[in-house]
Amino acid sequence: MKKYIITGLVTVIAATSSVMAGTTTVESKKTVVPVEEPCLYRDMEFQVDAFGTGAFYHAGSPGWGGGLGVNFFFLRYIGLGVEQFVVGNNDATEWGTFGHLFLRYPFCWGLSPYAMIGIGKIYGNQPHIGGGDVGGGLEYRFTENIGLFGDARWFYSPDIDTQGGVIARTGLRFAF
């Protein structure tokens, strides 16, 4: 009989200890990887610019007009571009063709300051004016493909009586 009592007590203790032990939980460690927002400025980026421009390089009244440009950024920070614009005032209508090297520092949340240096020629009623320019600007991207920009540059030419002037642009930039 003692044998049955001891066996019964061992059975009761074993049954109650598993009930009192609690539930078994398995913890799994999940690695949380932060999702990086895509940058709005890319390598190997082709751009088309449509802009309004002002030319302030004559002693007379300024010229107003517009133009188109194409740029290619083979690196996120360095690109080349070509633009064609037409400006006019009461005295004359002129058009210009410029090539530029762009250096930009894009912030992935949409803003990108840039510097530019280039050479070009202005044609029109006066003799052709050749020279170089240096300047800077700012671009803001709403999406990966659409942005606004504005820039100004100092145009220097030995062919102009005043030896130079300012050319300013503002417009839309479409990136592909």
Image: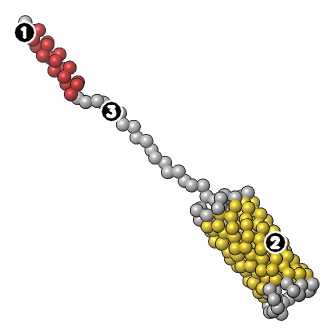
The residue lying toward the viewer, choosing from 170 and 100, is 170
Determine if residue 85 is in view: yes
Q: Residues within 10 Å of mark 2 (few under 14, many from 20)?
A: some
Q: Work out how far the residue at label 1 is from the one at label 2, CA to CA, in angstroms.
A: 107 Å
Of mark 3 and mark 2, the one earlier in the sequence is 3
Task: Identify the residue under disc 3.
Answer: 25
Q: Which residue is outermost to the top?
A: 1
Q: Residues within 10 Å of mark 1 (few under 14, many from 20)?
A: few
Q: Residues within 10 Å of mark 3 (few under 14, many from 20)?
A: few
Q: Amino acid at mark 2?
A: Gly
Lateral position of residue 83 relative to residue 126, left or right = left
Of mark 1 and mark 2, the one earlier in the sequence is 1
Q: Toward which corner of the image does residue 97 lie, by quadrant? A: bottom right
Q: Toward which corner of the image does residue 133 lie, by quadrant? A: bottom right
Task: Identify the residue under disc 1.
Answer: 2
* Residues under numbered marks 3 and 1 in contact, where contact means CB atoms less than 8 Å apart: no
Lateral position of residue 47 relative to residue 86, left or right = left
Q: Amino acid at mark 3?
A: Thr
Q: Residue at x 61, y 67 (%)?
A: 111
Q: Work out how far the residue at label 3 is from the one at label 2, CA to CA, in angstroms.
A: 69 Å
Specify the label residue 24 is tagged with. none
The residue lying toward the viewer, choosing from 156 and 19, is 19
Q: Is residue 96 above or below residue 126?
A: above
- In x, y percent, where is residue 117? 73, 76
Q: Amino acid at mark 1?
A: Lys
Task: Identify the residue under disc 2.
Answer: 67
Q: Nearer the viewer, mark 1 or mark 2?
A: 2
Q: Quadrant of the N terminus?
A: top left
Of mark 3 and mark 1, the one earlier in the sequence is 1
Q: Could you tell me which secondary element the residue under label 1 belongs to?
A: helix
Determine if residue 115 is in view: no
Q: Could you tell me which secondary element the residue under label 2 belongs to?
A: strand
